[in-house]
Each structure stands twice: as C-alpha cells, then as structure tokens.
Image: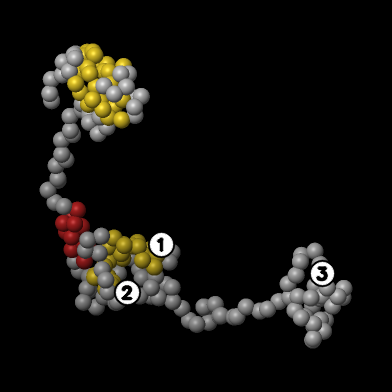
Amino acid sequence: MATHKVGGEVDAYCTRCKLTLAHIILAIVGTKIARVRCNTCNGDHAYRGAPGTTDRPAPAPRRSSGLSKAEKIIISFEEQLAGKDVANAPRYSPKDTYSVDQVIQHPTFGVGLVTAVRGDKVDLTFRTDTKTLVHGRGGAPSEKPAFSPPVRQVTGPADKPQLAPSDAPADAPVGESPVNGD
C-alpha cells in the first residue's frame, strides 16, 4: 500500500459528483485518510475509497479436505452396491414401482440404488449424485381417465334462465332464446 501525505492526491468517491475522481488529502488519522477535497467540485467530505477497494486483508483460501465430493460418493456408492445383483438390475421406467435397496439401471445416469421411497417419487443414488425420479405412474387402461371431447352446451348470461336443449326449436341458433325473440 502506498503511503499518503496531507496535500497529496488520491482517487476517492465524491459524494457531490457521484463519481470516483481525484481528490486532495486534507486530513489523515493514524494511517487512514479522514477528509478529502474534490478537484472537480471543490467539495470537502469524508474519504470514501473507490468502489471495490477495501482496507481489509484478503481471506486465506480454504484448504481441501483430502478427498473430493465425487470420490467420497464413489466410495460409499461402491460399498452400498456390495452384495447386490447389479447384472440383473431392471431398466428404469416411470411406470414400474420400486422399493428401498433395489438396484436400477438408468439409461442416462447408469446403475443406481433406491435409497428412499416417498409416495410416487424415489431417491436414486448414482455414482456421482442423487436424483429424485417418479415411479408407479403406469397402470391398467381402466385406471387411467378416459378422454372425452368437450360437449357444446348452451351458455348465456347468468341472469337469464336458459331452456334445456330438448325444449329449444331445431331451427333456432344456439345461444338465442326463442321466448323473448332476442
């Protein structure tokens, strides 16, 4: 850090100009600049350093703790798969239902182990991370809702009663009431 003297110049934020400009140092307390005068507007104010500069020392970088996150997961994943039948693992399908500790073969993420079942979702732990996927979404066609096209119904203002479709004459357009001739 450069040493500053009273009467010297320093870049500071001017509260009147709202810019970082050259200032003359008016007062120093200890090793810190206290007051400055803007060379542009001649305004005196407390010293405010340029944005992005601080007097604080930079924090020391954090040290890593030996193994990376991926390596830690790989070790625990391999231990969890020990003794499981990985070769005959079923292929993942959202239609199938899974249980805890079941091994699954996913087409994108690879071999995974079911670690939790929450309703229609399962947590699958793969080699590098854990994913939440759906299961049990399939079923017999009778269980699925049948598609029915929308039915055209006579609609009109809420304050006027409508005739039932069987009461309306065949030649009357839909939406008109034959009673009052509208």
Quadrant including the N terminus: top left
Question: Which is more N-terminal, label 1 or label 2?
Answer: 2
- The residue located at (35%, 62%) in the rendering is 132
Residue 127 x %, y %:
21, 63
> Which is in the foreground here, disc 3 or disc 2?
3
> Do the numbered discs 3 and 2 sit on residues whose CB atoms are within 8 Å?
no
Quadrant including the C terminus: bottom right
Residue 158 x %, y %:
76, 65
- The residue located at (43%, 73%) in the rendering is 137
18 on left or right of 9 = right
In the current view of this chain or complex, which residue is farthest to the front?
A: 40
Residue 120 x %, y %:
43, 66
Q: CA distance from mark 2 to mark 1?
A: 17 Å
Can residue 75 be spotted in the picture? yes
The answer to whether 146 is drawn above or below residue 9 in the figure is: below
- Write down the residue under mark 1: 118
- Write down the residue under mark 2: 92
Name the residue nearer the viewer: 75 or 20.
Answer: 20
- Write down the residue under mark 3: 161
Report helix, strand or loop for mark 2. loop
Report helix, strand or loop for mark 3. loop
Can residue 76 be spotted in the picture? no
Residue 147 x %, y %:
56, 80
Question: Which is more N-terminal, label 1 or label 3?
Answer: 1
- The residue located at (16%, 56%) in the rendering is 71
Which amino acid does the dot numbered 1 rest on? Arg
Which amino acid does the dot numbered 2 rest on? Tyr
